[in-house]
Amino acid sequence: MDKFFAAVQNMFKIPELRKRILFTLGLLAIYRLGAHVTAPGINKEQLEQVWQQVSGTLLGVLDLFSGGNFRTISVFALGVTPYITASIILQLMTVLYPPLKKVQEEGEVGRQKINQWTRYLTVALCSVQTFFVATWLSRNGIIADSAWATMMVVVTLTTGTIFVMWLGEQITERGVGNGISLLIFAGIVIGLPRGVIQIKDRIGAGDPWQTFGVIFLVVVLVALIALIVYVESARRNIAISYASRRVGNQTFRGQETSLPLKINMGGVIPVIFASSVLAMPQTLFSAFPPAQPGSEGYDPNSLWTKVYVFFQQFHGGDPYYEFVFLSLIVLFTFFYITIVFNTDEVADNLRKHGGFIPGIRPGSPTGEYLNTILTRLTTVGALYLAFVAFVPQLLLSGFNVARLPFVGESIDAFVTATPGLTWIPTGLGYQFFFGGTSLLILVGVAMDTVSQIEAQLVMRNYEGFLGAGSRLRGRRS
């Protein structure tokens, strides 16, 4: 611990690093100040009533990545979501569209071109999204039903998103860490005081079971954070050898290096995809609800009404929901990694540069060997993501064992009759949103930022956070 505090002191002894850290903290403060500036014409009371009905839809996922800004429709309501969407689209297009792949391979010039196209696509996506948001606000009576009110919301939210994108780029260029990731980090961690207050109230109630539940929750969260740090830092190093080669009159000796492969190469993207897909039915029903009992046109036997009734129970904690959710995480993990890591392309690049894996022939055999290793790593990574996403949801939302086929009722009777297990169907009842997705983002961003700061300290002959001879690796290391 003494080495850690010494490293923190050393951070502010280096003038350049001190300026970068203070610059980053300053821009994060500006971002949080903007979260308290509401868009013009918002009826806050009506917004709160409507939000209670749509928090489980895609709007809830959007609110998570906007740091709670969407719930209040602040000027930063969309946060960095349009920028992330644009980045993912262009990342996928580099695989599907060969000319864009060539631009990516142009080095720094190509990277700048793609960054510029990402900004343009962000503005286009943001304009479309803010129009739909303004339409949704108008239909729910949150803003006036007029073209002027709609235009004001579109202009305000689009401008706010562009400003947030600029803040993120400035942090990346002149601060410490990845700016976009740090903005998401700041939005999530702002809910920590609320969670601490809830825990304090539970302990202060004097109920021994409540106190035990708090201790159990804290222990599980600490264990999950340790698991995330361990897995995100883990690497499968594949030995790579480069043969001796002659260039002109000079002979370059062969080198030995390694190709590090992460266990979780997909990061948090598969969990985001799975959450978004499962939120679509609720979003659709909130936009086009069937006729309710007692209203004109209500038909309990219509297909749309039956589907609506089924999906009313299809949410976090429902066994069928959890099965589909975890299956989608595994599916999207394999899908995303297949796109972002092409084993045949890696094998071809190794062959072109004279590299080979000892004992494996260059070319197609190398690609097959890498594909075998990647499949095994992806399987472990997908199960890890599913576990990390499920455990916090089990603690916070519970698991409705009564809905299990065949044995659900007997298990539910046993659980409800056992004092220490009564929390399982309903969860522990906490309202803060430190779910699996949030934990993955928080820990991953923290590891990346600390890794960059430590690299700056080591480069200037200072000890890192773990002392001499140790090195903390971030997700991108």
Image (tube, rainbow, N blue to C red):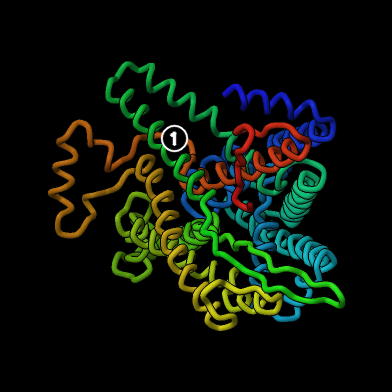
Which residue corresponds to mark 1?
Answer: 222
Is residue 287 toward the left or the right of residue 452 in the image?
left
Q: Quadrant of the N terminus?
A: top right
Residue 451 shown left or right of residue 412 in the figure: right
Residue 471 sits above or below residue 363 on the image: above
Q: Type of residue at label 1?
A: Val
Q: Nearer the viewer, residue 329 or 425?
A: 329
Categorize mark 1 by other alpha carbons within 10 Å: few (<14), some (14-19), many (20+): few
Question: How many numbered marks, from 0 up?
Answer: 1
Residue 137 or residue 13, whichever sits in front: 13
Question: Where's residue 308, x and y in %?
Answer: 37, 62
**Residue at image coords 63%, 62%:** 257
Foreground of the two, 477 or 201 = 477
Residue at image location 85% in from the left, 66% down from the top:
109
Which residue lies at the image location 32% right of the left edge and 16% below the top edge?
Answer: 206
Tag 1's secondary structure? helix
Residue 240, percent from left and from top: 60, 67
